[in-house]
Image: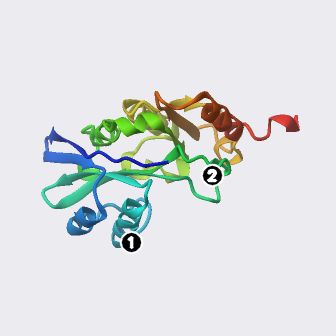
Amino acid sequence: MEHKKTYNAKELKTPKGTLLIEGPVTPEALASYEFHHDLTSFRPPAKQHKALIEIAKLPEGRIIIARRGEVIVGYVTFLYPDPLERWSEGNMENLLELGAIEVIPEFRGFGVGKNLLIVSMMDDAMEDYIIITTEYYWHWDLKGTGLNVWEYRKVMEKMMNAGGLVWYATDDPEICSHPANCLMVRIGKRVDAESIQRFDRLRFMNRYMY
């Protein structure tokens, strides 16, 4: 499958200044920007910056960023699911995972995450994919936000809805291990019925056990 990537951008005015939301960005552009030191949710900032550059080099990899001047203050990643997860078992070329989304504390609450997803879906090529994201409560910044798991889950769902992702049922053990965890999905307009059936089989792999 050919992974077409068309650059889109929009300005977002916030009380802390105007941000440019843009992408998919090239590895070269990513490397040229500074990575904010508060982007620490997944790994130390320098390592995460390097990881994003590597993702941008992948044929299917997409990185959408929010930046203030030359400084990246938020991002979202799309790539094939981790080989260790069930979602990769179908070897589906048209299944992408929204792997990470992060915004620095200074810019939270201004719709940055929502706009990262809106810009991501401006590319018509996204209609060729099934996009999934797995939400696990242990990745959430409950301490920093002061929210409980259910409040945070509500915020995450609302943000994902902005990108057209909605809740889907699954019997994945990790997702089922806590009621706040969830699978969210966006099925593009041009995804064929056979791909949707294959995806449904990945969602419910344990159905014959009962």
Residue 197 or 138: which is nearer the viewer? 197
Q: How is the image coloured?
A: rainbow
Name the secondary structure under disc 2: helix
The amino acid marked with disc number 1 is: Lys
Residue 128 shows up from this direction = yes
> Mark 2 or 1, which is nearer the eye?
2
- Across and down, in percent, residue 143 comes to 42, 51
Q: Residues within 10 Å of mark 1 (few under 14, many from 20)?
A: few
Residue 103 shows up from this direction = no
Name the secondary structure under disc 1: helix
Task: Report which residue position mark 1 lands on.
Answer: 47
Looking at the image, residue 36 sits to the left or right of residue 153; the answer is left
Q: Residues within 10 Å of mark 2 (few under 14, many from 20)?
A: some
Looking at the image, residue 94 sits to the left or right of residue 155; the answer is right
Task: From this view, report whether residue 15 is shown above or below residue 190.
Answer: below
- Across and down, in percent, residue 93 comes to 55, 47
